[in-house]
Each structure stands twice: as structure tokens, then as C-alpha cells.
Amino acid sequence: MRTSLDDVETVERACDRFRAAFGALRKRIGLRIVGQEAVVDQSLIALFAGGHVLLEGVPGLGKTLLVRTLADSLGLDFNRIQFTPDLMPADVTGTTIVVEDGLGGRAFQFREGPIFSNIVLADEINRATPKSQSAMLEAMQERSVSVGAETRRLPDPFLVLATQNPIEQEGTFPLPEAQLDRFLLKITVPYAIRRELAEIIHRTTVPGEVDVTPVLDAEDVLAGRSLARRMVIADSVKDYAIRLVLATHPGGEFEIPEFRHYIRIGASPRAAQALVSTAKVVALMDGRYAASIDDVRRVALPALRHRLVRTFEAEADGVDADEIVRGVLERVPADADHPEDGPPAGTIFAGETR
């Protein structure tokens, strides 16, 4: 993956290496994580798309283990923040303290919080109060932390993987819309099926523990992100992603009448960015050099479900965000009113042809 992109042949080799690296990372995670293939793939897609992940599921489904295993597989710095009702913002970002030197003098010194790491596990993020949850906002969007008059950059790559229990669970606080929108994907973690549960029991009730060693490093992740950003995506595919987002806006040009009374606030522009950036990674993952409409459809659920604010009528009728997104996918046509106006045949990146 550490390859110069000076010519087309090098680009093709880089794409092939990306696919191989993605597969190796997926396989390494599978040494500890049983099943959950879709959850693992979506988490890796977010990693290479450069966005954060919100994992939602009931306790005991392996969410925390997945994040730890990802960090071990990448050999990156890792910190865990256990969110509780008494957690303070300074416990996340860090604080300035007074230190005394050997001569008796005193000076202010900044002590970094656990947010200063490559991979941050925000465990049970919805058990903290909104004040503490908001401490993550600047870090997630700007990749920096402001304490007092100073702004400090976070390490690169920087990735937040937050876990939360369903909001119906006792002792939880719903995440504010502004923070939800900063997660690239919201991934729901399902229960293990019978075969997977049998394998989990087998692995965890015998002596020994699986040792996961790194298969990639920080430079590989950054190279993969750079490659994904340079991927080709036709204007018609971008337009499809835009129309999906606009279809969630009540009263808008592309609104879907059936869902007019179920959506209070539609998806933001970040949703369109998420659809395009993750679709590019999906194409690379499959060994293709250009993202397609099918790639956008594959990431629509995790990219949109947390960005819709439902009305009370939707809650009363039992219509959840996933049902709305599926309805949008069914009703928004793939073909637009204008002909496909993508890049010239043979284009891999802008300005580069075979």
C-alpha cells in the first residue's frame, strides 16, 4: 500500500494491494471475532473512508472486543473511555495542571486526556450526560482539542469507535443530533446465530487466548485513505447519492409523500459525503476502480439511519429509521433526468487515463 501513484500501472497495483490489505485485516480480526462479517466490513470501510463509527447493540455482543481487536490488528495507539454519568469533559480532553520543578518554581502543564490516541473506544457513550458527550464534538470534526486558549492537534490517523446500548435501556441519554451527524456510519450489531454462538462458546471455554499481531500500520491506513479519496465516481452516481439525501427532507423537491409525516429533520450534507466516501471504499474492497450506484445502496443504511429525526407519529406507528431508509431506496430511481456524465472511459483518477 505504500506506493507512489505516478502512473496508471502503479495505481492499479495500489488498488490490488488495498484489496489484499483489506482482506488481511478482515481475516486477522476474524481470529477473535466470530461472525459479524457485515459489522466488521462496515467498520473497516469507515476506517479507510476516514470517518467515525457508532456501534449499537445490547450488552455482550462483542462491540468492545471488536474495537480492541481492530487496534491490535493495526498496531496503533489505543485508549478506552468508559462513559458514565459522572464523567466530566476534562476526563476526555485533558486539563491544565500546576507542576512544581526541582527549584520550587511552578508552571502550568497540559496533561493529555485519553482522546489523544489513534483509536479511541468511547464505550457506552450514551450513558454519559450530554455535557460530557459534547466534549467529543470538536475532536471528531476538527481532529483537534481546544483547552483554554490553545488548540492541540490529535494524532493521525484518528478514529473514534463509540458503542451504545439501545436508548430504551435504563440509564441512557440520547446522543444529540449534532454528535450523531459526526459519525460516518451507525452500525447495528445483531445477535449471534446458533452456529456462531457454538463457536464463541468453544473459543472462550478452553485454555489460552488468541494473540492478534498487527498486519497494517498507521502509514498503511493513511495510504489507503488517500487512495480511496482519489477514486473515480461518476456524476450520475454522486447525483444518486444527493437524491437519496434530498428524499429525506420533508417538504423538499424530492420528498417521498409516504414518509412526509414520519420525518421531522432529514439527513444533512454530511450524509451525502458519507455515501460517496464509503462507496469509494466499497468499490476498492471489491477490486474495482470506480464506485457505482450499487455501492451507494450498500452503504445507505449505516450512512443514513442515524441522521434522520423521526416525528412522534413515526414513533407511535412503530416506524423506525431503517424502515424509512429502505423505503427511500425503493422509491428513488437509479436513473436521473440527465444522461450519465461520468469520467471518460478508462479513467482511474481525475486527469489520469489508461
Image (cartoon, rainbow, N blue to C red):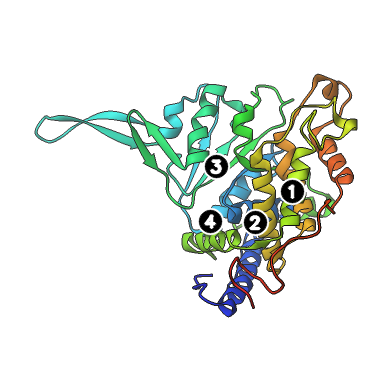
- The foreground one among 169 and 260 is 260
Q: Which residue is mark 1?
A: 241
Q: CA distance from mark 3 to mark 2?
A: 17 Å
The answer to the question of whether label 1 and label 4 lie on touching residues, with beta carbons closer than 8 A, is: no
Q: Secondary structure at mark 1?
A: helix
- Is 149 drawn above or below residue 330 in the view shown? above
Where, by quadrant of the figure, is residue 95 drawn? top left
- Name the residue rendered at 42%, 28% in the picture: 90
**Amino acid bearing label 1:** Ala
Q: Is residue 275 left or right of residue 105?
A: right
Q: Quadrant of the C terminus?
A: bottom right
Of marks 1 and 4, the one in the foreground: 1
Q: CA distance from mark 3 to mark 1?
A: 30 Å
Q: CA distance from mark 4 to mark 3?
A: 13 Å
Mark positioned earlier in the residue sequence (4 or 3): 4
In the picture, the disc for residue 32 is 2
- The foreground one among 142 and 105 is 142
Mark positioned earlier in the residue sequence (1 or 2): 2
